[in-house]
Structures are given as structure tokens and as C-alpha cells.
Amino acid sequence: MASKKTIIKKIQIVLTKHFDSPQDAFNFFDKNGDGKLSKKEVVRLLKEAEINGFIRGLVGSKLIEGYDKDGDGKIDWKEFKVALKEMSRDVE
């Protein structure tokens, strides 16, 4: 299984190489436009980051569990920004 650091690095690569800003990435993966990323939308981001299909669902659940501060089962823009900041610290 890929390490946490490897997964975070792959996510960062997708967000920085394919999008002009984190907001653009968030909007792209927020397919239904509700301002929040559901587990399905997070899993789509992980697929773009080439995270193995076997662990994609698990990692998606853990990301939501770790960053969903308001308890709605989704990641909103504010929570997404916090996640990005924490992920960049974890890779350093």
C-alpha cells in the first residue's frame, strides 16, 4: 500500500500541475456544484492522482473523516484549504 506521504505527494501533483489554483481544482471536482466534495468526488480526485483503485475508497473515507470539521460527511472549500495546508506540512 502506498504511504501517506506518497498519496499526499500525488494529490499535490494533480492539484498543482493541472489547475491554476486550488479553487479551480476544488470547483472541477465539485461536479454537482454544491460547494462541497462528497466521498464520490474525493475518490474522483484520488483517481486523477493515480491512487490505486483498491485503496481509493479507504483513503477517500479517511480524508473526509479527517477534514470534515462540520460533520456533514463532505469537504467544503474552507475544509479543503485546511487539508491542503496540512498536507503540505506532512510532505516537508
Image: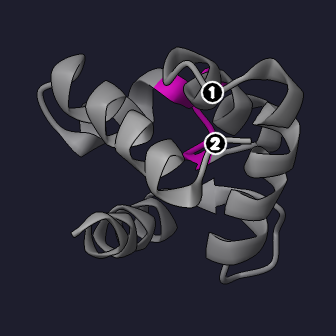
Query: What is the CA distance from the residue labelled 1 to the residue labelled 2?
Result: 8 Å
Q: Which class describes the residues within 10 Å of circle 2: few (<14), some (14-19), or many (20+)?
A: few
Please report the residue visible at 59 percent of the width from the left and 53 percent of the height from the top: 3
x, y percentage for residue 4?
A: 56, 58
Give whichever of 47, 42 is nearer the camera. 47
Q: Toward the viewer: 36 or 52?
A: 52
Describe the element under mark 1 as helix, strand or loop.
loop
The amino acid beneath tag 2 is: Ala
Give the residues in magenta.
29-36
Q: Is the magenta stretch mostly helix, strand or loop?
A: loop
User: Quadrant location of the N terminus?
Assistant: top right
Queried whether the magenta region covers residue 83, the answer comes back as no
Picture mark count: 2
Q: What element carries label 2?
A: loop
- Nearer the observer: mark 1 or 2; the answer is 2
Which residue, given by chain and number where applicable, does mark 2 sit on?
2
Q: Which amino acid does label 1 sit on?
A: Ile
Q: How crowded is mark 1: few (under 14 residues within 10 Å), some or many (20 or more)?
A: many
* Quadrant of the frame with the C terminus: bottom left
* Residue depicted at x 87% and y 27%: 54
In the rendered structure, find residue 75 and report the number of the disc placed on it: none
Q: How is the image coloured?
A: one colour
Residue under circle 1?
Answer: 51
Residues at discs 1 and 2 in contact (Cβ within 8 Å): yes
